Image (cartoon, grey):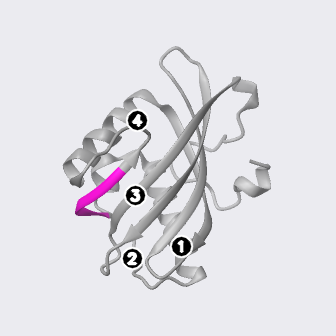
Amino acid sequence: MSLLVPPFTRETALQKVRQAEDGWNSRDPQQVSLVYTEDSQWRNRAEFPVGRAEIQAFLARKWAKELDYRLIKELWSFTENRIAVRFAYEWHDDSGHWFRSYGNENWEFAADGLMQRRFASINDMPISEADRKFHWPLGRRPDDHPGLSELGL
């Protein structure tokens, strides 16, 4: 994976969003944390991890709770070193209850292309298993799988 650096064009912003989606769909906290600066600052719901070690611990807890996690991100807007995305992901808890989580993220990047700040707002909606829309095998979303707009989300 090449590290795309600011200033972003529409093409590089789209690539950055897909790389982030692919990384998160790997559900590998160690690997995902490497795209953030050593002192990266986050707001994720009511948690405020700072730095890679806290990000790794956060992601490990997240994916231990959010089982069979599948995520789609979509570019909303971008500027020189900032990207805004909207996203949705589906998951179930250890009791088998399914959810679709919707949210928005604002990202700010350092000159080397690593993300230095990430602010996420997320809402969870219970869904039935029959209402799921993300059915690819765990891991990277296939290129031919519809995105959020195509799914009407």
Q: Which residues are magenta?
A: 36-42
**Res 15 label:** 1
Residue for badge 4: 63
Name the element at disc 1. helix
Q: List x then y, in percent, for residue 141.
A: 59, 53
Q: List x then y, in percent, for residue 109.
A: 37, 72
Q: CA distance from mark 1 to mark 4?
A: 24 Å
Q: Amino acid at mark 3?
A: Arg
Ranked by sequence position, the earlier of labels 2 and 1 is 2
Tag 4–tag 3 contact (CB < 8 Å): no
Q: CA distance from mark 3 to mark 1?
A: 17 Å
Ranked by sequence position, the earlier of labels 4 and 2 is 2
Q: Amino acid at mark 1?
A: Gln
Q: Nearer the viewer, mark 3 or mark 1?
A: 3
Ranked by sequence position, the earlier of labels 2 and 3 is 2
Residue for badge 3: 118
User: Which image quarter holds the N terminus?
Assistant: bottom left
Q: Nearer the viewer, mark 4 or mark 2?
A: 4
Name the element at disc 4. helix
Label 3 neighbourhood size at 10 Å, few (<14), some (14-19), many (20+)? Answer: many
Q: CA distance from mark 2 to mark 1?
A: 10 Å
Q: List x then y, in percent, for residue 136.
A: 63, 44
Where residue 57 sits, quadrant-wise, is top left
Residue for badge 2: 2
Ranked by sequence position, the earlier of labels 4 and 3 is 4
Residue found at x 52% / y 33%: 68
Name the element at disc 3. strand
Q: CA distance from mark 4 to mark 2?
A: 25 Å
Ranked by sequence position, the earlier of labels 1 and 4 is 1
